[in-house]
Image: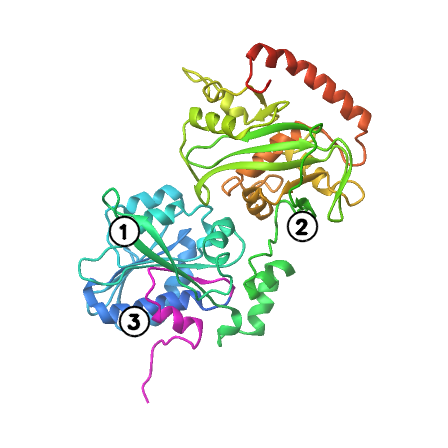
Amino acid sequence: MARYVWQPQPGPQTSLVNCPVDEICYGGARGGGKTDGMLGKNAIKAQLYGKHQRAVFFRRKQIELEDAIARAHEIYGPLGWEWHDQKKTYTSPNGATLRFRYLERDKDAMLYQGHSYTDVYIEEAGAFASVGPINKLRATLRSGHGIPCQLHLTCNPGGPGHQWIKQRYIDPYPDGMRVFKEKLQGMNPGSFIENRFVFIPAKLKDNAYLGDDYVAKLRMVGSEALVQAWLQGDWNVVDGAYFSEWRPELVLQPFQIPDNWMKFGAFDWGSARPFCYQWWTIASEAVVRRNVVVPRHAMICYREWYGAKGPNVGLRLTADEVGKGIRQKTEEKMSYHVADPAIFVEDGGPSIRERMGIPFYQAKNKRVSSAGRLGGWDILRQRMVGIDGNPMIFWFNTCTDSIRTIPMLQHDETNPEDLDTEAEDHAADTTRYAAASRPWATQQAKEEQLDKWDKRFMAAEQSYYDGAGSWLAR
């Protein structure tokens, strides 16, 4: 009877090894045999293609490579591969190579431009807040010997990259095992190449070598919600979400907004990263929509323009182009616009605000509460909580990017009072500017105080708008 050093377990691991697709996202749950699957598949490809097989295995941090390298010793050592510790590289008897590297910073991916690999393995892709560095590594996938080149990613729910992984690989078909095709720009203008990608789900039950002991250990390092997400591969569970107050009732079916309701805009600038402009209205009277009470003075985001060409990747439009786009998309009269303070900075020339041609009001930029003063995030949370179970802030379901990104945001690891700014937080920032421009406190804000503030704010703004000759006043 033949003895194997390693062979794939029946199910997802076997599907991974046999999968010829260009881009594979594997896993989705803890204990699914992800690292073993990647190392085992690479050993099989190396046996097939010999010295022309060149692979690289990435983790976010160097210390995170230790377990993968230790497991590689158990697989590759008995196969006769030679380990070069200084280079962190394995070389097979037939000349194939496997390097172990880390990408602590996104810009580290640029160091690999000009390299050639037949296989790139990204372990725990959810550690990357943006797909940017991974996309840069795609350029290294090439072979002059006809070897099928593949990008492999492993993942679990949670982490900074939860959003972009879910959007690209999970949302199109949550059950996985369906190949999708896309066209990528080729070397020459007008030329395209076809890229195929697939999600192969793997769960703890698919791994015969792990059981109750492993589950018990997981429960020691994560909450019950996160453990269940890890075990079931549930990408809709967001443990440790910064906005735990988010709930389905915050999302409304669109309805005709009464003409007498005040409208205003909020904006967060971005070029390499997405920009976000939101159109808001304030309910002048309470209404009920599908059993959801929208109280008086509630804020409703009824439209958005999210400037992105991919997860957390901006359109790189100029300030003039963004300003023109906002004006073209705004048909109604807006009472005011509030914006990211960064656009007011003058650095040897016109500010971004001036170039956009919109009379923005500088947003209050205090993020977290301190010294008895409410920060923008707490103001936003108060509106989510609302009064007597009725929220004081809502989004139309057409505001898809706000709804997609805000609930998924996580706490900053070094400052738990703030959210992780490396994640896709642009819609959240825009909403924070909007909420901070409408001061309100749960159970304490009286309608008379709000009305008084409205009059004082509008009086202060009116002289500016009249002098600017704004396109708003039409």
Q: Is residue 246 left or right of residue 276?
A: right
Quadrant showing the C terminus? top right
Mark 3 vs mark 2: give the one in front: 2
Q: Secondary structure at mark 3?
A: helix
Q: In front here: 373 or 435?
A: 435
What residue span does the magenta drawing correspond to?
A: 1-30
Q: Secondary structure at mark 1?
A: loop
Q: Position of residue 212 (x, y in %)?
A: 58, 73
Q: Position of residue 349 (x, y in %)?
A: 41, 15
Q: Give the residue number, with chain letter if any, for mark 2.
A: 248
Q: Give the residue number, with chain letter if any, for mark 1.
A: 140
Q: Amino acid at mark 3?
A: Ile
N-term mark: 2 or 1? 1
Quick check: marks 2 and 1 in contact, CB under 8 Å?
A: no
Instruction: Name the residue: 42% across, 51% down.
Output: 60
Q: Give the residue number, with chain letter if any, for mark 3.
A: 44
Q: In front here: 58 or 377?
A: 377
Q: Position of residue 332 (x, y in %)?
A: 60, 27
